[in-house]
Image (cartoon, rainbow, N blue to C red):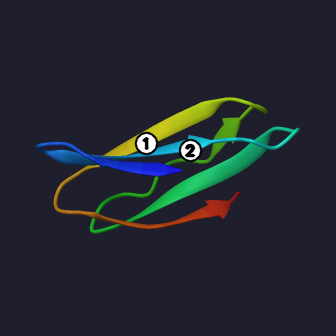
């Protein structure tokens, strides 16, 4: 997973290196958390939130 900082937002990019699909949710402090995302094996998904925010974690859902 990588966090990118843009002028007005931060973006979390989650890569699934597992052999099966994964369901994850990105947690942000000071911004709304992502919805539950299904990420197929070998794929990536991203979520972004407006600043000010802070990446607070990644959880299964």
Q: Secondary structure at mark 1?
A: strand
Please tell me the numbered disc located at residue 47. Answer: 1
Q: Quadrant of residue 21?
A: top right
Tell me the quadrant of the picture where the C terminus can be found. bottom right
Q: Is 58 positioned to the left or the right of 28 in the image?
A: right
Q: Tell me whether the residue at label 2 lies in contact with that at label 1, contact meaning CB atoms closer than 8 angstroms.
A: yes
Q: Residue at x 81, y 44 (%)?
A: 18
Q: Is residue 42 above or below residue 12?
A: above
Number of the front mark, 2 or 1: 2
* Label 1 packing within 10 angstroms: few (<14), some (14-19), many (20+): some
Front residue (pair 10, 4)? 4
- Toward the left, the furthest residue is 7
Residue 42, image x, y percentages: 73, 30
Residue 19, image x, y percentages: 88, 38
Task: Using the numbered discs, state the Cα–Cα distance from disc 2 to disc 1 in whole angstroms.
Answer: 9 Å
* Label 2 packing within 10 angstroms: few (<14), some (14-19), many (20+): some
Q: Is 19 positioned to the left or the right of 59 in the image?
A: right
Badge 2 is on which residue?
14
Q: Residue at x 67, y 29 (%)?
A: 43
Q: Is 22 positioned to the left or the right of 50 in the image?
A: right
Q: Residue at x 79, y 33 (%)?
A: 41
Residue 25, image x, y percentages: 58, 54
Residue 16, image x, y percentages: 70, 41
Q: Residue at x 19, y 42 (%)?
A: 6
Q: Quadrant of residue 52?
A: bottom left
Q: Is 39 positioned to the left or the right of 20 in the image?
A: left
Front residue (pair 43, 31)? 43
Front residue (pair 32, 50)? 50
């Amino acid at each position: 997973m990588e966090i990118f900082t843009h002028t007005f937002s931060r973006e979390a990019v989650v890569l699934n290196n597992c052999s099966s699909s994964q369901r994850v949710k990105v947690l942000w402090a000071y911004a709304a958390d992502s919805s539950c995302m299904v990420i197929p094996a070998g794929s990536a998904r991203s979520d972004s939130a407006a600043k000010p925010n802070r990446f607070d974690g990644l959880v299964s859902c």
